[in-house]
Amino acid sequence: MMARYKLVVAAIVLALAQIGFLGWMIVGRAAILRDGKEVLLKVEPVDPRDLLRGDYVRLGYDISRIEVEKIANLPQGEAATAEGPIIVRLKKDADGFWRATSAWLGAATTPAPGDEVDLLGQVSSGWSLTPGSTISVDYGIERFYVPEGEGLAIEEEMRKRNSGAEPELRSFGIKVAVAEDGSGQIKALMDGDTMLFEEPLY
């Protein structure tokens, strides 16, 4: 009887721990969406021939590739990147999109001024650090989930704009909320000034 009671208590404690962990993740994401500094990133589709995969669109940004010259703390004597975090400092441009001004492998040496924001990304090992090279950065915002049946029209329109077929139309953009630690969460998919889809807090 006592063993059965202990088993029930252990199961309840485990269930509460799992619920607490999931709740912590959800609340953390919602806090970034609610309180994070908002930036608008220009969308550059990863592959214009194959954007839609299931119920999400794969996205790339002009900040997905960072010029080596923008990295302030290049490691001396190293020819390639090691796997790890990178901080990319963004500033709003005249067209409303935020673009990279500088970057640091690991952590930034100075806090971002009020008109700039630091976005945390990850770099894989093996990217060349020779002058003129670029490194690829993953920010964890490279997928945007869309309602079923909505993705094909977006895919086709992105394909047209990426090819320059509709130069008079503004590029698609992604609104991103950035937390104080640099973590980013997608807030909305924008078509010019029109919001197509917005992420709910919960």
Image: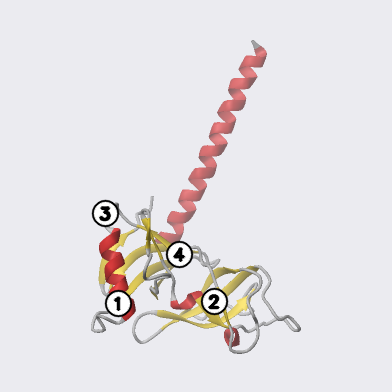
Which comes before the other along the chain, label 1 or label 3?
3
Disc 2: which residue: 88
Report the mark closest to the observer, 2 or 1. 1
Disc 1: which residue: 161
Q: CA distance from mark 3 to mark 2?
A: 35 Å
Label 2 element class:
strand
Crowding near the residue tagged with mark 3, few <14, some 14–19, many ≥20 C-alpha atoms within 10 Å:
few
Q: Residue furthest front?
A: 49
Crowding near the residue tagged with mark 4, few <14, some 14–19, many ≥20 C-alpha atoms within 10 Å:
some
Image coordinates for residue 151, horizontal then vertical, percent: 30, 59
Label 3 element class:
loop
Quadrant for the N terminus in the image: top right
Please state if 119 lies on the left or on the right of 146 as rendered.
right
Disc 3: which residue: 149
Q: CA distance from mark 2 to mark 1?
A: 26 Å
Which comes before the other along the chain, label 4 or label 2?
2
Which comes before the other along the chain, label 2 or label 1?
2
Q: CA distance from mark 4 to mark 2?
A: 16 Å
Q: What type is the residue that disc 1 sits on?
A: Arg
Q: What type is the residue that disc 3 sits on?
A: Gly
Q: What type is the residue that disc 2 sits on?
A: Val
Report the mark closest to the observer, 3 or 2. 3
Disc 4: which residue: 142
Image coordinates for residue 100, horizontal then vertical, percent: 49, 81
Q: What type is the residue that disc 4 sits on?
A: Glu
Q: CA distance from mark 1 to mark 3?
A: 21 Å
